[in-house]
Structure formats: structure tokens, C-alpha cells
Image (cartoon, helix red, strand yellow):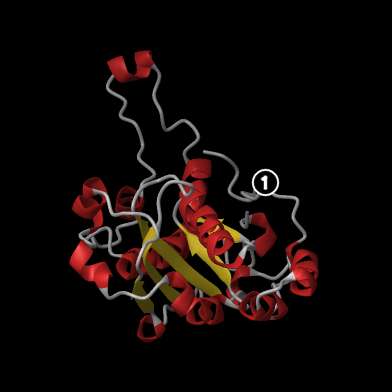
Amino acid sequence: MPDNKEPISETSETWPELFDQLAENAKDSRLKAFYQAGCVAPDMPLADVPLVALDFETTGLDPDRHSIVSIGLVPFSLDGIQVGKGRHWVVRPQLPLEQASITIHGITHTDIDKAPDLGDVLDEILEAMAGRIAVVHYRSIERPFFNVALQWRLNEGIRFPVIDTMAIEGHLHPNRRPTRWQKFRGMKPVSIRLADSRTRYGLPHYPPHNALIDAIATAELLQAQIHHHFNPDTAVKDLWL
């Protein structure tokens, strides 16, 4: 297992400075307000960082071919999760639902027929995210899907740092895919999916593919990861991406 003090982050972004630039250039007032709320200092210890767990359910995995159908978020810190302030939206996708995605998340045509467009609730989403660091499990969903969705609606995208609990698990288990010889000797692959990662920390099983429940599950997973492998004084810059 790697040295737990080794940074996870691979980004060279100076996020606070970038937010200042984006605030100046943003045309949409909601985006401008989001950036003006600022970004925490890179050296801030995780114990002091305001966090928000974020999860999207989508019609597929390609942000250029699929759309967001539900959004869940919940504010939290290392000390506690503000479940009462969690939010969940079902939104009407701009691209058609596919049967395969309905089977996974259970959101049907009936659910989205009268649902708002993402643009109609964008101000609420951005207000809930403003000033906080987003925590996700698999950053190739939330950040690119949100960016493309805003490009379509506003002709400008969005940028923000994330802490990816899947990336942390990947860092902690670099040899999770056994070689052929290791498989022959009985070694099993280590899954870094959300439910399997939670099991390693003794966290309870939650039904998957509800955006709000998955956001809460992600918040709990980060708390466990920090408790077991890092510490509250770890700088946020060591984990954000």
C-alpha cells in the first residue's frame, strides 16, 4: 500500500486564482455568483473545508450523447453530514431516455414528463455548491456532464475542483487487478465501486442509483477514508483534482 501521506491530487490548478478569473469572464449571473463565492485555500486542512457530496444519475456514460436525469447533493464536513439540507431533483433530459438507463436508476418517462429542465433549477444547485468543495465517486460523470449541460444551455461551461473517493480507493489499491498468475493462486480483484468501497470500511449497504442516497453514501465514504488513511490536518490540495 502506498504511503498515505502521498498526495492524491495530480492537478496543477491554482483553483482560487482560477475562480477569480472565471468570475470576471462568466456571462451568466448564476455562474458569476458561483465563482465569486470563491474557492478554499489549497493549504486549508480538510477539517475546516466545507464540502458537498454530489451525484448525478444519467441516461448513459457519454456526456456528449447522454443527459442528466437526477441530481443529489448534501453538504457535510468531516464531523457530520447535514442530511436535512440534502437536495434531490429529477430533471428533464434534453436527449431521450434509454431503456438500459431506466433499468439502472428507475427514472421513467412518466417521472420526467413534468420535471423541470436543469436550467430551471440551476440557481438552486449552484447556490448549494458555492463556497464548497464537491466530493464525488468517479469524477468522469459529475464534472463533464455538468459542463456539457451548461454549454448547451448557457453557451459556457463550468469548472470546479472535486475530491474523488474512487480515485482515493484507486490510490490505496494500486495493485487491485491481479496478474494471471495471481488469479491462478486465488487472488481476487479489488473493486473500487462505491458499494464495494464502503463495505471495506464497514459502512452499511444502501440501495444504489438514487442520486441523493448515493451522495450521502459518498460523503460517508470520504469521512471513513480520511479517518483510516489520512487525517483531518491533510491539506485539501493533496486530494482535490
Q: Could you tell me which residue is drawn at 60 percent across and 78 percent down?
A: 130
Residue 109: image quadrant is bottom left
Residue nearest the observer in this picture, 97 or 225: 97
Q: Is residue 193 above or below residue 151?
A: above
Q: Amino acid at mark 1?
A: Glu
122 on left or right of 91:
right
The answer to whether one can see residue 156 in this image is yes
Image coordinates for residue 45, horizontal then vertical, percent: 66, 69
Residue nearest the observer in this picture, 218 or 106: 106
Q: Is residue 85 above or below residue 126?
A: below
Residue nearest the observer in this picture, 40 or 204: 40
Q: Could you tell me which residue is drawn at 48 percent across and 47 percent down?
A: 64
Mark 1: secondary structure: loop
65 on left or right of 49:
left
Q: Could you tell me which residue is drawn at 50 percent across and 48 percent down?
A: 140
Near mark 1 (Cα within 10 A), the count class, few <14, some 14-19 or many ≥20, is few
For label 1, the residue is: 10
The answer to whether one can see residue 76 in this image is no
Image coordinates for residue 59, horizontal then vertical, percent: 33, 52
Image coordinates for residue 187, horizontal then vertical, percent: 31, 25
Q: Is residue 166 above or below residue 45?
A: above
Image coordinates for residue 129, horizontal then vertical, percent: 55, 75
Residue 238: image quadrant is bottom right
Residue nearest the observer in this picture, 209 or 12: 209
The quarter in which the C terminus is drawn is bottom right
Q: Is residue 185 above or below residue 125?
A: above
Q: Could you tell me which residue is drawn at 71 percent across and 73 percent down?
A: 27
50 on left or right of 41:
left
Q: How many marks?
A: 1
